[in-house]
Every structure is written in C-alpha cells, then in structure tokens.
Image (cartoon, coloured by chain):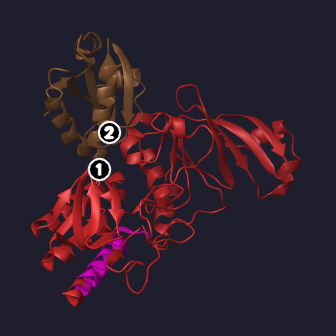
Amino acid sequence: MYDVIILGSGPAGLTAAIYTTRASLKTLVVAGVKWGGQLQLTTDVDNFPGFPEGIQGPELMTKMRKQAERFGAEFVDDNFSQADFGKRPFAVTVAGKVYEGKSVLIATGADTKWLDVPGEKERIGRGVSSCAPCDAPFFRNKNVIVAGGGDSAMEEALVLSRFATNVFIVHRRDSFRASQAMQDRVFATKNIHQIFNTTIEEVMGEMKVEKVKLKTNPSDKSLLTKTPAELDKITAPLLPHSNLAVEGEFITWEANIDGIFVAIGHIPNSTLFQNIDVDEKGFIKVKDHYHTNIEGVFVAGDVHDRQYMQAVTAAGFGCAAALEAERWLEEKR
Amino acid sequence: MADKTFTDATFQQDVLQSKTPVVVDFWAEWCGPCRMVSPTIDELAKEYAGKMIVGKLNVDENQQTAGQFNVMSIPTVMIFKDGKPVKAIIGAQGKEAYKKAFDEALAS
C-alpha cells in the first residue's frame, strides 16, 4: 500500500514525488513507457531557473528523476491501464499488476494535438512528425513545414533550420503568439520563413510526405481578384507550388514539401479517468487547491493547466498538489 | 547491450541474407526517445535469443541503410524476414507493444 501514487513523470509528477518522499510518504511513480513527459522531446531549455547556460530537456528530466529516487520514490516505467477511484484504497493497474494507494496524484500531462486532416495520420513517421529534435536530421537539405504559432512551433523551426534548406512556418493567424524572445530568434534565422493566415488542408504523397494542400485567407482582399498566374508570381518564392485557385474568400494551393512538423498545441491526457470532472476541452477541473472532484485524488501540471503550460509552472503545481496530498493524508490519519 | 550492431557494410549479409528473422533498432545519439527504448530492446534481445536476431543501427553512421528503408523518424524498430521488412514500429513504445509485433512477425 502506497501513501501516494503519482501518475505521470514530467516536471509536475517528479516534483510532486520529491515533496511526498521528503515528507516520508511511501510514493510510487507510474512513469509511463515514455517517461519524462514532453521535455524528453525538446532540446535547449533556457527558461528553467537555475541553469544559466540552459539545459537539454532530457537531461533536466533525468536529473529530476534522480532527485526523486534519492529520497526513495519507486518507479514503474509502464503505462497504467486503469485507475479505479470508486473504492478505497484507490487501485491503479499497470501491466496487469494492481497497486493500491491511499491517495492519487494525476500528472499525466498532455500529448501532441495533430492537425486531423486527410493524409496526415498514415504518414506519421513518414514525413509527419511532432518532434524536431528526434527527426530533424532526416530532413537535411530538404524543405519542411512547421504548423503552429506558439513557442513550441518556434523551437521546432529553430531546430530544423540547422538541417533543412528552408523551413516554412504555416500559421492560421496573422501573427505568432510565441514569446518575443523566441520570435526574435526565428526572425533572425535566414532560412526560416513565415506563411500567415494559412491552414494545412491535406497531406499528400505516395509512400511519404511529398505535397500539402494549403488554404490562405489573405488579409489583402484585392488578391482574391487576381488570376492564378498573377498569384503564382507573388506566392512564397522559395516554396515550390502549383494549382493556385481562388475559392470564395480563400486562395487554395499545393506546395511540394518533404516534412511537416506539427506544433499546434496539446490535448490533456484525461480520457483514461472515469468520474473525474473535466472541462469541455478535457482539462481536469481543479477544486480548492489541486483537489479534483474525488476526495483524495489530486491533480497537477498540463493535464489541468490550459493557461501556462511551462516546465516551471508544472513543477510548481506538482509541489502544491503534493503538499495538499500530504495535508489531506495527515488529517485522515 | 543487444547482441548485434549493424552497419551499411554488414546489412546485406547480417540482415537481408539472414535465415533467422532480424529486428533492427534504428537509433542515434541525439535522440532522447531512442535512449528510453534502448534498454527494452536489450531485454528483448535476450528473451528472443534463438528465435530472432535483435540489433541496432546508428542512423548517423549508416545513412544509406536508413534512407533505403525510408526511416524518417526514430526510434524505428523494423522486423526483417527473408530479406524483406515485414513490420515497422515507429516511435517509442512499451515492451508489450514490441513483443506483440515480434510475435506477430514470427507467426506470419
């Protein structure tokens, strides 16, 4: 029997584990097959305090894990298949084995949100990717698209710019919402180009990604009166394209591309929990300082946070939820 | 360590001409998820000893083979039977998922 079972091993889960173990609570971390969370898919982390020169995402997670292990946290590197909050103690099933916990802390984070357009899913790993640090070297001297406009899209583009000939950031709005520091780095990089007001409609290609269908909603409406030949001359000169057409308020076109890196946001990993209240987007609802609607089940990190989504805020939420769990267990004693 | 390391130079002989099914883990130093998967592949190499040859191929040092089999994302774990790729598992997976794929390939 564990005092606390922590589901997830990103900054929220591991920080929580450091706090619960230091409070002498017997702690199990169900770390998942891909332990370490989203930071395992990044390179330079320059905004985590304490590392003035920056630190690699995977290295930061390894350090956090070692810190939790130092105080006695136990780990299973597998995914849980079921979490039963209907009875006490709570029961969490991992690879056929049932673990019992007096309390549970949900820190399952969030996963890549894909574009959800035709042709995308079957080409994941065949030119469609969500991890530039993993896959960028395969696009040496090739042209790639990054979809998105936030910090993670900027990071993907910067990583890719070191390998690819040209990187095109395709964003549906007319400006990025990424931090100024990241935008500055992107705008200062010669082979990164921006394509605003544009969405990806379809991914095409025989075995792998070869083409995308794009749809642009131009801010200059006079463009909608031009002929395809005229449009062709003023459209993304470095991106080979074809089949330009005006369709109502939009210009549709096709571009030749070797890779698409998707960074349009994340989906909270909350679907495996029954009877836990979530909002309309699937984020777990927080009651009164990191409690969920079920007494004894706490929550921290990106699975409940739709506002900040930073490594350091996730760590902070993990700490807070751990302290709440500790207090709650104390009161029950 | 997995019992085998494959290279561009040895691939033809060690993988494509092998009588025994071969599992190739395409990886690279800079790939975080590859490092996560690596211990699992090592365990599977032991568990499947005699039934399958399980080894690793560094995609940086062996770009020709990686390109030949359209590896564009790592880790990719590819199963070869009679000189042909019969299954590719792309992205980091759990041990059970790999075992299932290995068993299916052996049974086919």
Q: Is residue A317 magenta?
A: yes
What element does badge 1 sit on?
loop
At horizontal 45% and vertical 70% (from top left) the residue drawn is A275
Chain A image colour: red
Dots 2 and 1: beta carbons under 8 Å? yes
Looking at the picture, how far across and down is residue A3, in whole percent? 19, 74
Give the magenta-colored segment's residue range: A309-328
Q: Position of residue A173 (x, y in %)?
A: 66, 60
- What subunit carries mark 2? B
Looking at the rendered structure, the kind of residue marked 2 is: Ala
Q: Colour of chain B?
A: brown
Give the residue drawn at x 13%, y 27%: B3
Question: Which amino acid type is shown beneath numbered disc 1?
Answer: Val
Badge number at residue A33: 1
Decide if residue B86 is in sight here. yes
Which residue position holds label 2? B97
Residue A183 belongs to magenta span: no
Relative placement, left or right, of A225 versus A304 is right
**Where's the N terminus of chain A, which quadrant?**
bottom left
Where on the picture, by quarter, is residue B16? Answer: top left
Q: Mark 1 falls within which chain?
A: A
Q: Foreground: A306 or B94?
A: B94
At 23% from the left edge and 87% from the top edge, which residue is drawn? A332
A94 or B65, nearer to the observer: A94
Question: Is B80 situated left or right of A282 in this image?
Answer: left
Instruction: Count residues near mark 1 (Cα–Cα under 10 Å), then give few for <14, some for 14-19, many for 20+.
Output: some
Cα separation between marks 2 and 1 = 10 Å
For label 2, the crowd category at 10 Å Cα-Cα, with few meaning under 14, some 14 to 19 and many 20 or more, is: few
Disc 2 secondary structure class: helix
Please give the name of the residue rendered at 32% of the width and 16% of the height, measured from the top-left corner: B81
Position of residue B18 relative to residue A272, above or below, is: above
